[in-house]
Image (cartoon, rainbow, N blue to C red):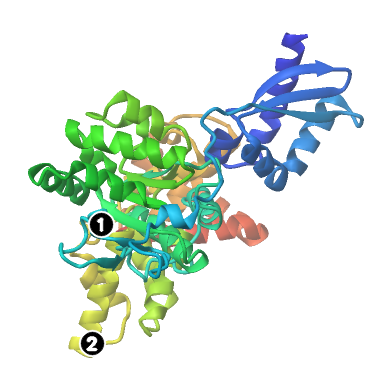
Amino acid sequence: MTKDCQMVWDSCLRIIKKNVTPQSYKTWFEPIRPVRLENEELTIQVPNKFFYEWLEEHYVQLLKTSIRQELGDRGRLLYHIMDGATTPATQTPDPASAHPSADKDNEPVPGVFDAEMIKNPFVIPGIRRVKIDPQINPNYLFENFIEGDCNRLARNAGMAVAKKPGGTAFNPLVIFGDVGLGKTHLAQAIGNEVVSRFQSKIVLYVSAEKFTNQIIQAIKNNAVNDFVNFYQMIDVLILDDIQFLSGKQKTQEIFFHIFNQLHQNGKQIILTSDRPPKDLEGIQDRLISRFKWGLSADLQAPDLETRMAILGAKMEKEGVDIPNDVLEFICYNIKNNIRELEGVMISLLAQSTLIRRDVDIELAKEVIRNFVTTINKEITVEFIQELVAEHFNVPVERLHQETRKRNIVIARQLSMFLAKKLTNKSLKAIGETFGGRDHSTVIYSCKAVQDMMDTDMIFQDTVSELEKKIKLSLNH
């Protein structure tokens, strides 16, 4: 029975995997375990109630389809929800106890504490009543965080946390990814959203470096208890760049106790890192284990469309009208880093304003030379072969070999067509780069491609897209 149960669920997973993104599959379906199969009812085990609710809200139709395909029209799916010992409490602490008042006539104010009772490491001592500044940039909002396949999971999880801080399974929420992909923006967008929705919530953003420096000062002043007490009052703690805690044992020890207290009290913890928790070095195992309690969501390099949307939105906000061809040119050349896109934008605005030039391709070329090195490279037949082979998902060396496989033949013919159109190579020289073929083969290939373009609009679009990509990538 157990084997049948696993086999049915494995078959369902094969269907599901074809219909969701790899990140969604890893997050929402890999943790599921089949429990039993009775008649036409499959029971699956999910980690907690929130997990179940998310599946029902976002993937119920896909689950029904896969179950019915495996078990027939009478197939049913049942859930077994685990009793999660680490599921956070959702009760909100009594404001009177969370924000103690010095006297009866001085009622507690949301986000305000008594500095004589608990010292605030963010302010100068001596001020008795201080409102805690969230330390977040008001410009970092969900509205200007452009969504794409590269960040959809992290953004949606962030919004879920902002709507119900401390009350979801995403605690802690760990946002990780390479430099310049928007980790800080998203983390602070969550903070801004919480501030706007819940005026009584105390939100605080702090970098790991600043957090460490505060601990050093607290140790010097013999005020570690005050430091810990202050952080335990926070409702939503955002700690940026946790990889910088590496090797700092005392800082990790103090943060471990703060983390435990916040988590046990149902407070929300948001962390950012340049790598997933499992790859963090120099961090105590007990902390790594706690980082894995919630959700780790990665930010990947944005695709072309997302890069264009990001840059277009930023230029529009600055009141600059940027032609679409310039937008495409920039985004083809700046591929991995949103921060670089912002750098290009600033340079374009400066150049356009200072020397009173329109934002056009020529100006974009001048600016981008400061960011990339491929801008002046010559288009080569080899580069065309690599690009076309990648598009058709075939090894480059197969373009040089004898074969009648249709996809390889079309890839080779299209490479020859683009080489003739975009390079100064002779027909003989082009043929030589394709395994020693002669010029007549190149002529035949070019004619075959042109015929296909005349009769197949989809193929014509493919050729146009590849040609544009070559021109923009290397700017011949």
Q: Is residue 348 visible?
A: yes
In this rendering, position of residue 150 left or right of residue 58: left
Q: Position of residue 65 (x, y in %)?
A: 80, 37
Residue 319 position (above or below residue 338): below
Q: Position of residue 437 (x, y in %)?
A: 40, 38
Q: Which residue appears at 57% of the width and 60% of the height? A: 461
The one of 17 and 270 positioned closer to us in this rendering:
270
In this rendering, position of residue 427 left or right of residue 120: right
- Residue beneath disc 1: 378
Task: Please rate how many residues cluster around mark 1, counting C-alpha atoms within 10 Å: few if below 14, some from 14 to 19, many from 20.
Answer: few
Instruction: Give the residue at the far left of this rendering.
Output: 220
Instruction: Give the residue at the far right of this rendering.
Output: 74
- Residue beneath disc 2: 353
Q: Position of residue 59 (x, y in %)?
A: 70, 43
Task: For marks 1 and 2, give the one nearer the viewer.
Answer: 2
Q: Earlier in the sequence, mark 1 or mark 2?
A: 2
- On residue 191, the disc is none
Q: Is residue 177 visible?
A: no
Give the SS element for disc 2. helix
In this rendering, position of residue 12 left or right of residue 358: right
Residue 330 position (above or below residue 296): below
Which quarter of the rendering shows the N terminus? top right
Q: Which residue appears at 40% of the width and 31% of the height? A: 290
